[in-house]
Every structure is written in structure tokens, then in C-alpha cells.
Amino acid sequence: MKITIATRESRLAMWQAEHVLSRLQALGHTVSLLPMTTQGDQILDRTLSKVGGKGLFVKELETALADGRADIAVHSLKDVPMELPEGFALACVMEREDPRDALVSPRYASLDALPQGAVVGTSSLRRVALLLARRPDLKIEPLRGNLDTRLRKLDEGHYAAIVLAAAGLKRLGLGQRIVQTFEPEQMLPAAGQGALGIEICAGRDDLVAALAPLAHGPTWTAVSAEREVSRAMGGSCSMPLAAFAVWQGAQLHLRAAFGHVQGEADQGASSKPLATARGEAAAANADEARALGAVVAQRLKAALAQQQ
């Protein structure tokens, strides 16, 4: 089968697409890449929450699917909106890489080692809230651009440290840049973080069958629970929300956290205490996982209401 993959042009996105390409080629398919620049890659002077959200990274790729230039699109799942536009479907979720957040700094060995008032770079409202919950003295400043651009800005001295997804660093062979990996208990990951999702036009059963060997059931079920929390909360990148599920035997354990970021990251943002919720279930499939996500989302809303 001939398959064309639409992908962003960043080095990490290309790695992800080439990873899928090699897996599909090993199954006997003829695969090519269609690299593209998205709006999310072009708008670097404003935070995503101000310019349209995570969908800016996928719209051009979806257009390529719709007009037949490409068959599949490979995404970092945490960049995929919770509700896909009509006519599109998530056909495959691959096995998760490290889902954790990572601190990168050329001078300091950990978050605790950062001096009072140190400048930390991130444009994720989730990370802003979680960082300020641990270190309210920090000055959080926006950080946009692809992975290499972010690392260059750090090395040029604009920040004392930056926070990135561990998965991206590891996929590009940059794991040695990590000085501290945050356990979920320290900094709860974003829904879908570390997982790759493959999008298609709805109704392409031939592609669903071709992609089936790449799918990882335990990951797909876990991220279904996480994404349901985000969907139920109205999840977007303008919301400081974390959701993370792990398997313990046959039980899926799901935790969620919601922060309160006051002010903009570049104007001295502050954070109130986090609202948290958790739940567990023997989720045998994605529907049962989403049911768990809905329950945890309701508990999180109740926790938020108690803070009012």
C-alpha cells in the first residue's frame, strides 16, 4: 500500500514521521513524507493560548489529508485537540515514550538549586502553574519555537532553566541535556504527553488496518482517559490542566490537576494552590477509560468549586 505522511518540518516532528515511516516500510508498505510548515510553527511571538491553541499545529496537515495530498498525519498527541474536526479520526496511538517533564539548565542541577527569582522558560500554562506551586519565587517567561530554538535561547543566556518534554529530548538523542526529570508526583504531565497519534480522514478503513500493528493498546486506553478529563474541562492550551494515567496491574489509575495562573507569564504570573482529583478503574477499553476520565473530571470540578 502507498502511504504519504504529512508532518511538520521541525526536527522532532520529522523524527516522529520517519519513525512511523520505518515501521510501515517494515510491514511492506511504500511510504513517503510531505513536510509542511504550520501556523503554530510560524507564530512565535505570542503564547498558543492567545493565537488559537494547539490546533494551529495540525490544521495544515488536516488540509493535506482532506485534499488527498497525504494519507496520514503524525502528531505529538498532546498537540492534538480533544475534539477533531468533522471528517477526521484518530486511527492509531503508538507506545508512549517517557511522559515526564524535564528541566534543562547549563548551570543548575535541579529546580531546587535555582536561585531566588530565577528566570525559567515555558509557554505551557500547565507548567507555569505547577512550577509556581513548587517555587512561587520563580519568574516564568514565555518560550516558543521548536526544540532546537528553545535550547539555543537557553544557551544564549535568556533563561536560567527551561522545562521541556523528556520524550522529545530523548527522541532526538538530547537526553544528556536533562538535569532533572520530574516524577508525576512532582509535576503531573499533560494529557497524551510522550505519545504519538496518527490522524486520518474518517472512513479510511484501509488505513485503519494498515496502522493496526503500530497501535499500542495500553497507551491508547490510558491516554483516552487523560484526554477525556481535558475534553470535559473544556481543555485547550489556555487551560492550566494536567491529566496522567498509569497502569497498576489491571487497574488504570488516573490523576488530574488544575492550576490557577494569575497574570501573564511575561508579567510576573502567580499561582494559587492546585485543585487535584484522582480515580481508578479496570478499564478494559477506550470507552471505559473515557468513563473514568469523566468521573475524575467531575471530581476535579468539585475540588475547584470548594476553592471558590
Image: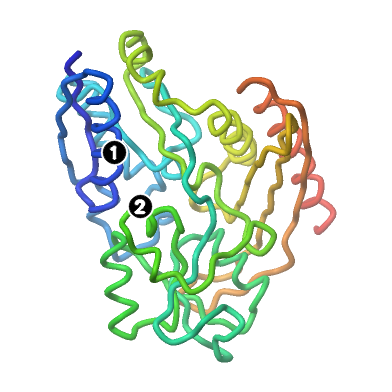
Instruction: Check disc 1 and report the residue beneath it.
Output: 19
Q: Which residue is drawn at 80% across and 58% down?
A: 308
Q: Is residue 120 above or below residue 236?
A: below
View extreme (right): residue: 306
Assess disc 2: are there few (<14), some (14-19) or many (≥20) residues with their C-alpha within 10 Å of its C-alpha: some
The residue lying at 44 percent from left, 33 percent from top is 94
| The image quarter in which residue 141 lies | bottom left
Query: Which of the pair 154/306 is nearer the observer?
Result: 154
Q: In this view, does 274 lie to the left or right of 34?
A: right
- How many numbered badges does the structure rendering display? 2
> Which structural element holds mark 2?
helix
Q: In this image, 44 relative to 37: left or right?
A: right
Residue 131 location, quadrant? bottom right
Within-10-Å neighbours for mark 1: few <14, some 14–19, many 20+: some
Where's residue 151, x and y in %? 32, 71
* For the residues bearing labels 2 and 1, Cβ distance under 8 angstroms: yes
Q: Quarter of the image holding residue 260?
A: bottom right
Q: Is mark 1 on a helix, strand or loop?
A: helix
Q: Is residue 95 above or below residue 29?
A: below
Q: Which of 263 and 193 is in front in this view?
A: 193
Q: Where is residue 166 in the image (x, y as percent from the top left)?
A: 46, 58
Mark seen at residue 304: none
Amino acid of disc 2: Arg
Q: Which amino acid does label 1 sit on?
A: His
Q: Horizontal and vertical percent for residue 32?
A: 14, 29
In the rendered image, the vertical position of residue 191 relative to residue 74, given as above or below = below
Disc nearer the start of the sequence (2/1): 1
In space, the residues marked 2 and 1 are separated at their CA atoms by 10 Å
Q: Name the residue under label 2.
A: 171
**Residue lying at 55% horizontally and 67% vertically, measured from the top left:** 128
